[in-house]
Image (spheres, rainbow, N blue to C red):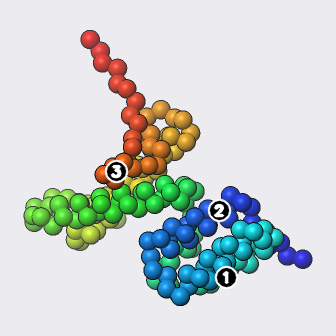
Amino acid sequence: MADYTLDDKKWNARVAMIESHMKTNDVGDMKAVLQWNLKNGTTDVDNRKRYWSNITNMFATVENSPIQIGKRSTLPQAVQDSISAICAVYAEGFSALFASHPLYGEVLRARGTAGYEAYSDADAYASSQVSNLKTRLTGYYKNHTDELEGISWDGTVNKSGVPNFTCPEMEVEG
């Protein structure tokens, strides 16, 4: 017989992803069915892959589906949600900056296949800045979890939406 089990860690990560999506997006008539599949998958360990298959089929035609093909983030859902919130504010700020004066369109350049090219618009510039920020935030979180030297971040934000970074102390000579 086929194996339809899924370990707790993978299942719980998927449940958190779907619940997070339902909190921030209107899933309409799918909500009751999603909750039913999540509830039954949590209690019926032997058939979790079947319940997950039901969920993925429901999101197959949804435009803003939280289920993506390819490599998934290994960060906890709460940290992913924090990164998304931070990046939304970051993108808005960089878009506004770029659009504030034509100088930015002429001076700021993206590295491309043909050398350094001007960004096509404010959104392209903001997207590249957000990509860099995601990489930094993920690195800071890994520093925290792996207890490495350097700037670390526990994945939380303060009331203002600013990440709670821990920076190493600098030694001052002299």
Residue 1 is left or right of residue 20, and the answer is: right
Dot 1 or dot 2, earlier in sequence: 2
Q: Looking at the image, which is closer to me, 168 or 121?
A: 168
Label 2: which residue? 12
Query: What secondary structure is found at the residue carrying circle 1?
Result: helix
Residue 154 visible in the displayed image: yes
**Residue nearer the viewer, 38 or 99:** 38
Q: Residue type at mark 1: give it.
A: Asn
Q: Is residue 59 above or below residue 97?
A: below
Residue at (72% x, 60% y) in the render: 8
- Mark 1 nearby-residue class (10 Å; few <14, some 14–19, many ≥20): some
Residue 109: which quarter of the image? bottom left
Nearest the eye: 28 or 79: 28
Total marks placed: 3
Q: Residues within 10 Å of mark 3 (few under 14, many from 20)?
A: few
SS of the residue under disc 2: helix
The residue to which callout 3 is attached is 159
Q: Earlier in the sequence, mark 3 or mark 1?
A: 1
Query: Which residue lies under the disc numbered 1?
Result: 54
Give percent across and percent down for residue 146.
Answer: 56, 39
Amino acid at dot 2: Asn
Instruction: Give the residue type at disc 3.
Output: Lys
